[in-house]
Amino acid sequence: MKITGVELRRISMPLVAPFRTSFGTERARDVLLVRVVTPDAEGWAECVAMEEPLYSPEYVDGAADVMRRFMVPALAALHHVDAYGVGRTLEPFKGHRMAKAALETAVLDAQLRASGEPFARFLGASRDAVPCGVSVGIMDSIPQLLDAVGGYLAEGYVRIKLKIEPGWDVEPVRAVRERFGDIPLQVDANAAYTLTDAAHLSRLDAFDLLLIEQPLGDDDLVQHAELARRLRTPLCLDESIHSAAHAAAAISLKACSIVNIKPGRVGGYLEARRIHDLCRAHGVAVWCGGMLETGIGRAANVALAALPGFTLPGDTSASRRYYARDVTAPFELRDGHLAVPTGPGIGVDPDPAVLAEVTTSVEWLPA
Ligand code: OSB
Ligand code: MG
């Protein structure tokens, strides 16, 4: 495959409700969609970089800039490109894994659409539907939180994740346990604590949580290992795992016993699969995280979540949990599950009319 050109399209997607985490409140997503055009097929991908560098160092304008300035020209110069070649070609550029992931995914989608193979089959999926959890933001009050959790349980979500931060941790967890009993429940701190909070965090041990996700900083693998020794609750890493090498280091250090895999965070679905394979070989459970994706990103995540090592429900919620109108046909929860797309490539297409309405800018980068 030779690349004809790459389209960078920005869309504005209002969330159905604000989503508050320890690092900020998201009201609408400013999403960068990538469309790679080749003579054989086109491929789509969603870049998960957020508007501001608060979750990770990447941000959406920076991702568009590094693609436009360095990455797309490097790929466009190749006479032949496939998904594996994208990683090799972009390897000299340090970091920017979300940007790399989007380009690799769009090339992989084009390649699989050309050969007629679904993403899930290419990755090695073993299921045709995946159980879904939901990530519940920090709220203004406990009653508001209980209403939100009750609504999601009524919709059929099989696991609840509560966002926590200092001042919003033990009490909301206790309230949810008291109201809803023995539901599968976990928490995510997005790096809001330090090791000096270990005694406080150990109060969460009383609630039989599935896991505590990323309590400490991105760089704090050694401190996470120390914290893991002090907690009964299993420790899961998100922000700290940028690659299979980081996952290997975390496992060796016993810094976590569970990994949240987000393909954007680790540079793409090929690296995500390597992390899955590594964790599975070490008996470390993985689950598929989310970045509030539209249907474009969700389709590929659901395919990944169908791999055999994804033994915990993911943050792969239905379209309506995020958006009143998705850019693809909506993903809908059936009996707590989302169906894995079966069409070629990511198996979904953006609706041109919806896309036109939400688009804020389009840039064509010819090869
Ligand atoms: O830490 O998992 C996270 C959303 C944006 C950035 C980071 C995170 C999240 C979520 C939401 O928890 C997951 C989702 O439903 O997409
Ligand atoms: Mg997280």
Image: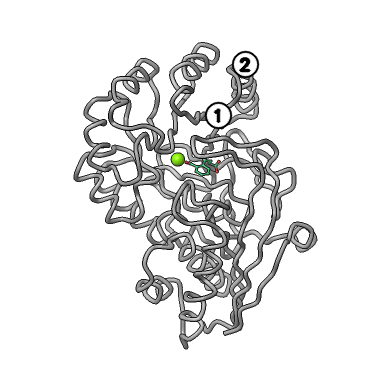
Give the mark nearer the N terminus: 1 vs 2. Answer: 1
Residue 265, image x and y in percent? 43, 54
Q: Which residue is mark 2?
A: 143
Residue 45, image x and y in percent? 57, 63
Q: Which residue corresponds to the image point at 63% horizontal and 38% vertical from the top-left?
A: 333
Nearest the viewer among 113 and 263 is 263
For numbered disc 1, what is the local secondary structure? loop
Up-down relation of residue 8 to residue 144 (above or below): below
- The quarter holding residue 88 reads bottom left
Nearest the viewer among 41 and 100 is 100
Q: Which residue is mark 1?
A: 138
Nearest the viewer among 83 and 103 is 103
Up-down relation of residue 276 to residue 138 (above or below): below
Mark 1 nearby-residue class (10 Å; few <14, some 14–19, many ≥20): many
Q: Is residue 40 visible?
A: no
Inter-mark Cα distance, 1 to 2: 12 Å
Colouring convention used in this rendered image of the protein: one colour
Q: Is residue 189 left or right of residue 5?
A: left
Disc 1 marks which amino acid? Answer: Ile
Residue 197, image x and y in percent? 32, 25
For numbered disc 2, what is the local secondary structure? helix
Mark 2 nearby-residue class (10 Å; few <14, some 14–19, many ≥20): few
Q: Is residue 281 visible?
A: yes
Q: Is residue 27 left or right of residue 59?
A: right
